[in-house]
Structure formats: structure tokens, C-alpha cells
Image: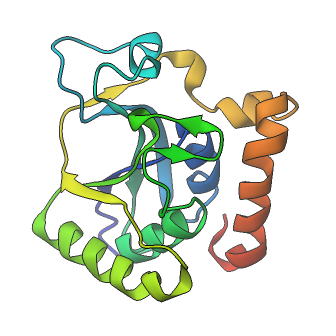
Amino acid sequence: MSEQVQVATLGGGCFWCVEAVLQPLNGVLKVIPGYAGGNVPGVPTYREVCSGLTGHAEVVEVHFIPEIISFETLLQVFMTTHDPTQLNRQGGDVGTQYRSVVYYHNAEQKAITEQVIKKLQPEFEDPIVTEISPAPRFFPAESYHHNYYAQNADQGYCQYVITPKVAKLRQYYASLLK
């Protein structure tokens, strides 16, 4: 096995949630929270991105081994552990920074993303509105955002928003966990 590492850049609301859901997957080497897709110069900060004025989305950069977990499987988990039918929000997190987005790194990722969305659409009552765009520059988030759920699982937001998503992951994708 060559174990060539690939990168996926995904946004599905708060990056703490997406990080917590994707980290435990077998074949995922690391998940880095950050920002992408903005339209202002310089390195964005959390405060600036949360203002909604920079155009950035909260995303994660996922480093994975496709021989262990395919991009398609990674996307299926991602798409079914957040609500891809909500435009610019996830639950109480509202704004363009919380948009559902797949930033593809090559033509194959774009094609797979389109196929997965088409395949999953019948499972949702409303249309999937996940943005599909070429991967822009990625900016890692400030260090206190990394491994946030693992370090703050007792915090209120984690308990009420992230823990149910992790429970859903364990219920439906137990065979994919490390």
C-alpha cells in the first residue's frame, strides 16, 4: 500500500463540530480547523470571520489516506452528520461563515462531490445547498480551536451541539472508526 496522503477541505457549520466528527475516522491522519473562501487580504482571525464580513467559511482541512478511507466515504460521513440543506447556517450558528461547502482540490474530488450529493439528495426533504468550489487558500485557525471538542467536551456548546453529532457518527459509522 502506497499510503499516499490526500487533502479534503470541508465546511459544515462550526469547525469544532466537523473536526470532532471526522477525527475519529480510520484513515484520517489529522483534521485542522481554519478558514477559507474569503475575499479580504491578509490572514483572517476568528473574530473577523465571525463578523461575517470577510467572506471566509469555517472549514477543516482533512489529511487522509484514500486506501483506508475514500474521499467518497469521507464525504458521505460529512454530508450526513450536518444539515447540507441549510443555507448559511447550521442550527443556531447563522451566517455565511457557517455555510456547507466542499472545496475540491482536483477534478476527481469535484466529480465525486457532485456524485455523492446526487446520491444523497433523495434522503433529504429539502434541496442540498452545499457549495462546491475550487479550494482557495486555507488559513489554520488559532491554536485554541484545535482539538476543541476533545479538550472541552463538558462545555455547554459541545454538550448540546457536538456530542449529538458524535453520537450519530458512532451509531451509523461505527465500522469506520479507529
Whether residue 104 is visible here, answered yes or no, is: no
Residue 160 placed where, x, y %? 82, 42
Q: Residue furthest front?
A: 126
Applied colour scheme: rainbow
Residue 156 placed where, x, y %? 84, 30
Q: Nearer the viewer, residue 110 or 124?
A: 124
In the figure, is residue 81 to the left or right of 55? right
Whether residue 108 is visible here, answered yes or no, is: yes
Q: Nearer the viewer, residue 125 or 16?
A: 125
Vertical relation: 104 (above or below) 108? above
Split into 4 quadrants, where in the image is the C terminus?
Answer: bottom right
Q: Nearer the viewer, residue 67 or 18?
A: 18
Vertical relation: 36 (above or below) 13? above
Q: Residue furthest right?
A: 154
Q: Residue at x 19, y 33 (%)?
A: 137
Q: Nearer the viewer, residue 19 or 134?
A: 134
Vertical relation: 131 (above or below) 150? below
Q: Residue at x 57, y 70 (%)?
A: 80
Q: Residue furthest left?
A: 107
Residue 43 placed where, x, y %? 26, 13
Residue 59 placed where, x, y %? 41, 40
Split into 4 quadrants, where in the image is the N terminus?
Answer: bottom left
* Residue 105, quarter of picture: bottom left
Q: Residue at x 39, y 74 (%)?
A: 70
